[in-house]
Image (cartoon, rainbow, N blue to C red):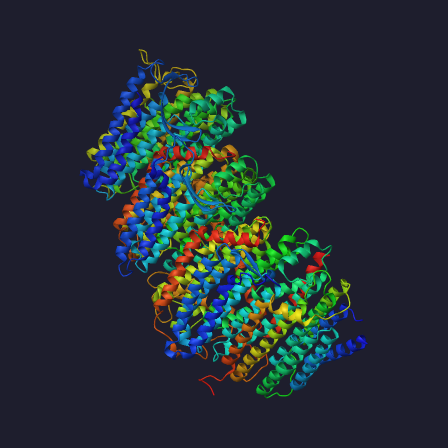
Amino acid sequence: MEWAWLIPVFCFAAAPLIVIFGDRLPGKGAFLSILAIGGGFVVFWVVFGSFLDASPATAGCFTSEHTETLTCDYQRSWFHAADLELVWGILIDPLTLVMLGLVTFVALMVQIYSLGYMHGDPKFGWYFAVHSLFAAAMLTLVLADNFLLLYVAWELVGICSYLLIGFWHERPSAREAAKKAFIVTRIGDVGLLIGILLLWREVGSFSMSEAFDAASSGAMSEGVTTAAAILLFLGAMGKSAQVPFHVWLPDAMEGPTPVSALIHAATMVVAGVYLVARAFPIFSAYDADPLLVVAIVGLVTALMASTIALVATDLKRILAYSTISHLGLMMLSLGAFGYTAAVFHLLAHGFAKALLFLGAGSVMHSTDELDIGRMGGLRKVMPLTAFVFSIGAISLGGIPILSGFWSKDEILVAVSDHRNVAFIVFALITALMSALYMARAMFITFYGQLSQGMEHVHDAPLRMAVPMALLAVLAAVFGFLSFNWPGDYDGIGSFIFFGESHGFEFTWWLGILSAVMAVGSFIFGWMAYVQARISLDNVKATFAPVLKVVENKYYFDEVYQWVVDRVVLVFSGAIAWFDRAVVNDIIVNSPADSMRRLGFTLRLHITGHVYSYTLAMVLGTIGLGIFWWLRST
Amino acid sequence: MSNFDEAALFILILVPLLGAVLIMFMPKERPKDIWYLSIFVAGVSLVLSLIIFARYDYDQGGFQFLRTFDWIDAPLNIDLSLGIDGISAPLILLNGIVLFGGVLVSQTILHRNRDFFVLLFALGAGVFGVFAARDLFFLFFFYELAVLPMYLLIGVWGSSTDFGTFLRTKEYGAMKLMLFLIAGSVLVWIAILAVYVEASDAGVPDFSLTTLGSLSESGQFSDTFQNWVFPLFMIGFGVLAGLWPFHTWSPDGHVAAPTAVSMLHAGVLMKLGAYGIIRVGLTLLPEGADNWMPVLITLGTVNVLYGAVSAMSQTDLKYVIGYSSVSHMGYVIMGIATLDRIGMGGAVLQMFSHGIMTALMFLLVGAIYHQSHTRDINVLNGLSSRMRVTSFFFAIAGLASLGLPGLSGFVAEFMVFTGTFRTYLPLAILAVIGAALTAVYILRLLARTFLGESDQQWEHLTDGSVIEKGVGGSFVMILIFVGVWPEPLMRVINVGVYVLPGL
Amino acid sequence: MVSLFYFQLLSAGLFGIGLYGVLARRSAVLIVMSIELMLNAVNINLIAAASHLDGTGSFVRFDGQIIAIFVITIAAAEVGLALAIILRIYRNRSTVNVDEIDIMKW
Amino acid sequence: MTGLTDNLDLLTPEFALAGLAFLVLAVDLFLPDDKKHWLAWLSVAGLLGLIALAAVMLWGEDESLYDGLLAIDDFSLFFKIFFMGMGVFIILTSVDYVKQFLEHPGEFYGLILFAILGMNIMAQSRELLTAYIALELLTFCLYVLVSHARGSARSNEAGLKYIIIGAFSSAIMLYGISMVYSTLGVTRFEDISLALVSAVDVSPALWVGIALLLVGLGFKISAVPFHAWVPDTYEGAPYPVTAYLAIGSKAAAFALILRLVAEGFVPAVDRWDQWQLIIAVLAGVTMVVGNLVALAQRNLKRLMAYSSIAHAGFILAGVAALSQDSQLASNGIMLYLVGYSITNLLVFGALIAFFNITGKEMIADMAGLAGDHPFLAACIAIGMFSLGGLPIFAGFAIKFYLFAAIAEAGFLWLAGLAIFSSLISLYYYLQVIRQMYIESAPGSATASDALGHGEPEAAGAEIAESEAESVEDLPEFVGLDGLSPARLTASPSFLLIGVLAIALAAVFWVGVYPSPLLEPIEAASRAILPGT
Amino acid sequence: MSWILFILLAVLTLGGALGVVLTRNVVHAALALLLSLFAVAGIYIVLYAEFLALVQVLIYGGAIIIVLLFAIMLTRGSEYPRISDNRQWPLAAVAALGVMGVLMSSFLINKVEDTEANSPVFGDLANSLFTRWAIPFEIASLVLLVALIGAIIIARTGRDEN
């Protein structure tokens, strides 16, 4: 099991190899990256197997007193900073394992898909290099057993996303999006880093387990614990695009679509959720105030994003905002102690969202069109894509027996159990809206009559189809993992849990309610967008002002833009001017100049006339005599 | 200790000087041969510094390669005594590397390149000397020797630039730099004399750092004395370290200086100041240091933020980098001012990594400027499509400077933060924010200059020469290596930091 | 009997007058004359001291008068050389007024 | 009166030197005009011989001749050799100049020899009158030498100003001597110190007398406010004489002051130490004023004049730091004198060579010198750096030693002031270097277009005019007036090159390894400060 | 007796000196100088320094004044015989008075109790001049020589002019 470090290392190794030798290798060395991630996937299964039959007796393994799950920890020394030793350490527990599985699998799928999608791109090799670096960073992130390593991986994820979003940097919009993504997340990272250092200051080590011990054992004061948790959560908000840091994610679609799939589903954004889950002991220490913050932020994010998704007209934007809202749901669930539910939804959503993006990608690939207004009835020309997309959509929309339904249901259960009624109401509204925009995206794009100019459109090639198909299967059936099956497997709750293991429980009224809402909204969508029986115009008319606000994404971008232009840049300009005009020209130059002027003035005392010279001597003499005299008497 | 170890440092200092003398007698009509010879000399010093660094026994620790030559005996007691510890060893290595790189990329300098290399080697020898000196006089001696050539190096081979609103001539830059640094050394000089007087009042008139160190350990230096002398050292050396508000010489000097000089200046010269604060200020006047640290660390924080913010709105590549070095030297100063082992170690590591990093940046800017004849961010664009390797290296350097993990900058800054968190929490938070600001201007720079489509006017640009690629590549390698596995440096630095008093 | 003090006063007065001449005259020749006055003041001082104080304390062998002899010698030499230079200047510049002799200043 | 003239032989070098001077004057009569430079070789040979003679004959002697008027000790020996060595170099550097621009070479060299004789006596006289007479011998030689370029109006003017102020100050000094005599009755240094120690209360007449004495000496060493003659005289005098003024007469005056203070005042310092503060103040004013005014100069000679004023300030600060129990200060002063003279020799040698070629002496005229005559430029640059006190050149080591001594004597503020003002001085030294290395020679675009892709022309112009507006009211001179340009040569002679090379080596040597030099210096200090 | 003589001579001395520095006529100034110098010689006699008085008369009266008169005649300028003072003469007066004040008050403060003035034995004077003060004597002669040479080479008309 201690060979788990191989999983990221494969990918780390692949990246430089492709960069250096890529041009000389067949297929620009893309296969290297696929081999690496594939190897990672294989190793994952090996590790998974050995974890399943591992016990606290196994070397490096023990039962964590926080999660009560089996945990294995392996460390190698990295370097010494004076008296502080920093380590490479990997920690393997159920959370890590499922994340490993998700990342390796989705990344593998996306890369295979990319073979087709990115075919013929001039920077094909570079693409795959960064891709595997991305995956490697994410894998390290989930494997890290100390905050320092986690932060390292965290930053690497950020920079890779920068590179991938800005992949087509010839497009200014792509450049801007990449910069935005990096800087916005970086702001969150400041919080994360401060939080980490704060923990270190208290604990004297970066090891997570020690920090958890300190938090739960009360060695760390409540104030500090809360502060640390909030700061960590800042980082998580940045990465997981929670309000108000969500602005970067929708723009991130400037990158190639597979990249969006990876970012939205498996790597970048889930990092935040993962961090909160990982640091759950700190969040839940004392009376868990931080979790309330998490819940609120998650709820707000989910609501806001889903409303925007309802009115967005760009397919990828719809998906992006749906991601945000689902991340909000995960946070909400975590904030409601729904540890298992959050992770479960993370997985389910990951598969579904990856599928959806790949689908959207294949649509875009063949139509070069993203505005759903101009699309329609694509089912006829690209049936496979339409089919898998629909599966993803209804799964995410929460139609029963598909995985999305189960995971969302678990979240609702958690919320209704631990938080007051307001939360559950808004959560249900969010669920409804997510069903609605999913239905909207799906029906408008693929159903109804084929819009003109789309006749020549062809379906996805094999290299793109296969990954979509595989993902579709998972998106459909993954949910069944949540049941207690006959045999010794009783529900995912018995595998991933915080505190006590719990089996599968189903709250009937919630389940039926959400099911009804989901089905209803899909029927509504069918009527509205396919049959056009219902016209939304009067609705739009009544809600016009609200709609305007929503369509403008609540003016977040505008505000930020204003701050950057009017505040930051102006301020830095002022400082720069100050440096040149004040510090340099006044504080520095003027003494020097005054020296020179003084010299030029003083030189006039050499008048060139002997008698003034002698006069000076005499005055000096008198001065000497008198001065001396005064001194001596 | 073998004979080599006894002579090593002396040879190390002597090699560049002798090289300079040798070059002086080369016929000036054959610049190529002069360049080859310089490469040879620099190579020898590089190898020497590598050997010395490798042979430094970090298990034993303390000062090694000790050697003392009598210079002036009583009543002044000045000896040329050399020796390095864990703090100076990496810096010596740094100087060897940067000097070699600088000489290599000075291939493009053909105008009076004999004088150029002579002065360059004088500078290099001075830097080696400062890091190796164990005697106040000689530390100061080499310190000034390192400053001395800058005037001509910038004045003769530099470039004047008109920024529309204001003008920066190379004469101005050179004179300003020279006067600033000498002004700083004026304070240092006074302070040294004060220390000497105090010591001779204590009955031990001596300049040897070892003697003085033991003197201060035995509490011979009164607190009041330390309190008024330390600021002299602090500001005097701080000027060379780009301490705010005495930093303005640095960006202007960069803008005026030729590539190799910028590399050495930002890469090594600015480190002398920080090193001086550690070696002299901290070692001799721990009490004064203790009392003045709040001021110093505040100034350091100002450096970080101020440098970063003013770098944001610069339009000249070299100005951006110049201000970024001001900001990064701020981390060094903070690390020193923490008086915390981790912070100090971070400071030393930051010196090394920033040395390599900023040298790399200036190298690449030089490569660009050499072809495009402009450094204006608003004019340059889309270079990555014309100069792929150069842009890639620049990106790496930029990422290193914004503290991307996996590159050396991160480890150093992280340690500085750590140390600061243990001592000055609020300032530490500011510093972390400063690190985020770095990202802003670096990305702005990358986006404006390197990414995107390039104009027609940059059609002619080609990628850097083999030499530039080679040097740049090796610098990148160092950045990555230190970032991934800092232990080889850290274990040396640690033993150096451990013995510092007052930590 | 005139005591030493009055001679000293006399020499001081002479010295001051000569000094005024040096500072106030325009013609170089006059300046040289004034310097001569100052030197005489010196001599008066020396000789007076020698004559009055000889034998008292550490005053021996009329050193004062001997010094005075040397002073006179030097004075003579000075006058000769100075006048030669003044002559030379008069030839080149046809003036001996020191406030016209100022091509070099500042 | 017996015993006075015992071991008169110890004065052999002086007598021989006088003889040598007479010989030169005599041989001059018989030499045809084109052979006059043989006189230079003659005097050089003689001086070298005398150096050797003095070295072997007087080593370790410690005698006092003529009832303590003259001292034959290591101090005087050190300075004797120093002066004669300097004389050798001065003569060597002036050969070409004399050949090209001056008449009466015989008198020129003869007077230089007499001047050296005067210096030697100054260094070994330990009595006021003897010192004064010797000083007058030196000064008279300089009067003549300064106005030696008879045709040049500036030379005449310099001579006039010099002799008027010289005579005036010598009158003041004599009055001081007379007052010392009339109060103490003695004029020997050690008698003065004894009187000071024993006197119940020191009469103000004595203070005034000593003050007047200091005025006279301050004139010689050009301490502010007795410095006003220096720039004009330096500028007007023939170049080698300027060098000699800067190197020789200053050093001699300091030798005299050193002995006077060390033997006359220091032993009584416990009862009476006002002189320290006064000299310190004088020194401070001198160094600051000298350096500040030098910032405004455009004529090389005037620049060097002010720089020499400033350096006099440094050395004077060392005098203030003399103390009974430490010879640090006196070592520092002598080391400084040596290093400073060598450096000045280097600079002036190069400047003289430059003048021999171009006949120009403004700073602006040196533009592009590095391109045309790299060696000269290097010599001047190194000399300037050394004067500015930058390391591996003499300037740094000697400054460090001297300032350490000053600080150690309790004048840390003075040392600080000195260090600061040497920072100011760096500016104008660098201006000269800039002219030679950075500015391109007028008409030739050698430099700064190959590099400086900005617009250095515009930049340079901008700077230039900013310079101009600040100094446009300075008088403009052609380099040589009254000296016919026909006498210029194409390139510096090998002789000068050789001299410069030696001086260069010396500058590096003093800067890098001065301790051999310190052996005799410490012996000399022990001679005048037996306490140490 | 000696008092009267002293006062007379002092008046002559200072009067002549004032004449030198105040008169507007060069020749008058020279004559005033002569007067003052002779008066000084008289003072010497009052001080029993006959030898010095002799020297004074010979050298000053005989040599220096002559040279001065020669110089005056040779340098007769257009403005002859009128001469004037320079711009700073009031300052000069102040300074001179200041110096006088410093000197006189310094004398005033310590009145050395003095004995009867007496004169040296010539023999002693000569003896000490030529034994103890031999070296200054030699040098003084060299000074004279140097002044001579200098005067010649400076003052005499060179080849390039006449």
Residue B225 position in % (x across, y down): 59, 42
For the view shown, which residue lies furthest in the front direction? D2
Give the answer, above or below, for where B4 lies relative to D225.
above
**B5, above or below E107, in the image:** above
Q: Is residue A487 left or right of residue D337?
A: left
Location of residue D36 by image quarter: bottom left
Q: Quadrant of the N terminus of chain E?
A: bottom right
Of D482 and B489, the residue lying toward us: D482
Q: Is residue D168 above or below residue B487?
A: below
Residue A203 percent across, percent down from the top left = 48, 26
Count of labels shown? 0
Viewer-proximal residue among D18 and D382: D18
Residue sticking out furthest to the left: A26
Residue D289: name its quadrant.
Answer: bottom right
Residue E140 located left or right of residue A132:
right
| Viewer-closest of D335 and E153 | E153
- Give the x, y percent position of residue A175: 35, 45
Q: Is residue B481 left or right of residue E69?
A: left
Residue A523 seen anywhere in this rendered image of the structure: yes
Position of residue D509 relative to residue A5, above or below, is: below
Whether residue A221 sits left or right of residue A619 in the image: it is left
Question: Residue A466, percent across and down?
Answer: 22, 30
Residue sitting at x 33%, y 66%: D446
Q: Is residue D468 visible?
A: no
